[in-house]
Image (cartoon, grey):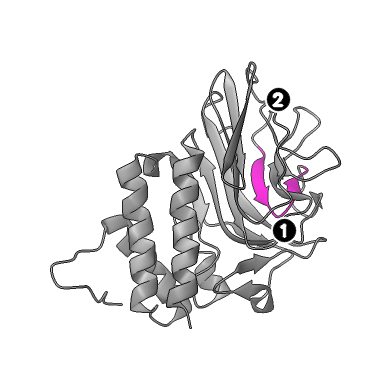
Amino acid sequence: MTLIVRPGFQFDTDASTYIEAVEVADAQALETATRYAINDFVIGCKQDGIWSAIKASCILSGARTLTGALIPLAGTAPTNLGPFVSGDYNRKTGLKGDGSSKALNTNRSRSADPINSFHCSVYSTTTCDNAVFGVTTNAQSDQILAVSATTGPAIRGRSVSIDFRVTGFIGASNTASELTARSSRVNLTSTGAAYGSFADSNAYWVFARNLGSNVSGGSPSLARLAFYSIGESLSLALLDARVSALITAFGVAIP
């Protein structure tokens, strides 16, 4: 479908490719303002120097249909487990978990990113519960964004006590010596050595932990998520600002 542009304005190539794929999946064009919001997000991430670190991502909002929302912004398309149905999806607020059997397999292996450079994030429009992202096996400890009795994420063997029972952007990013976790627009950090290697290449799931099975997940969430990303280490504050602006813009652009 042909993109409508402002005079003297040109869409970013990556944004254009994504928008056109969503519109094909939706079988209908997006609103011009929705297109601009996506374009501004991509351009902004590139200006901030964080775009190249996003290796797998879906904007789980904005699109007119669930099919469109599962078009990847970056990386491989997720596998719809459960599955989610159209009634679970809202263009402004995202995709709703059922706290039981529904999850997205991101098809992003945890061995795909450097051991000392990793991030994961989601944007929740409802208060988070249980695991909104993660993978767990007997061979290694959790890599997870989750809510539990103690709260907080555990990424590559290090943890930060930060409350994820919130709405909005939550995420974690690690280097070789430090983990940063973010929620409610606040960063907290923890130091310590990362894992040296992983014994498996299980894929990350969203809305639940991947327990190494294609048919079940751990700690399934009831959260409604509008975005997720996985990849190499980046500034969580910069990504938070861009994602939050995108979801806010959708709220204005979408009737």
Considering the whole magenta stretch, tell me its main secondary structure: strand
| Position of residue 116 measured from the top left corner of the image (x, y, whole percent) | 54, 23
Q: Nearer the viewer, residue 139 or 90?
A: 90
The image position of residue 112, as x and y in percent, is 53, 35
Which amino acid type is shown beneath numbered disc 2? Gly
Residue 158 relative to residue 7: left or right = right
Residue 134 on the magenta span = no
Q: Can you identify the residue that label 2 sits on?
A: 157
The range drawn in magenta is 202-211
Residue 50, visible in the rendered structure: yes
**Residue identifier under label 1:** 127
Q: Residue at x 77, y 27 (%)?
A: 139
Q: Quadrant of residue 94?
A: bottom right
Q: Considering only vertical position in the picture, is 237 above or below 94? A: above
Say which of 67 and 189 sits in front: 189
Residue type at tag 1: Thr
Is the C-beta separation of discs 2 and 1 under 8 Å? no
- Check disc 2: other Cα within 10 Å, few if <14, some if 14-19, many if 20+: some
The residue tagged with tag 1: helix, strand or loop? loop
Q: CA distance from mark 2 to mark 1?
A: 25 Å
Q: Which mark is residue 205?
A: none
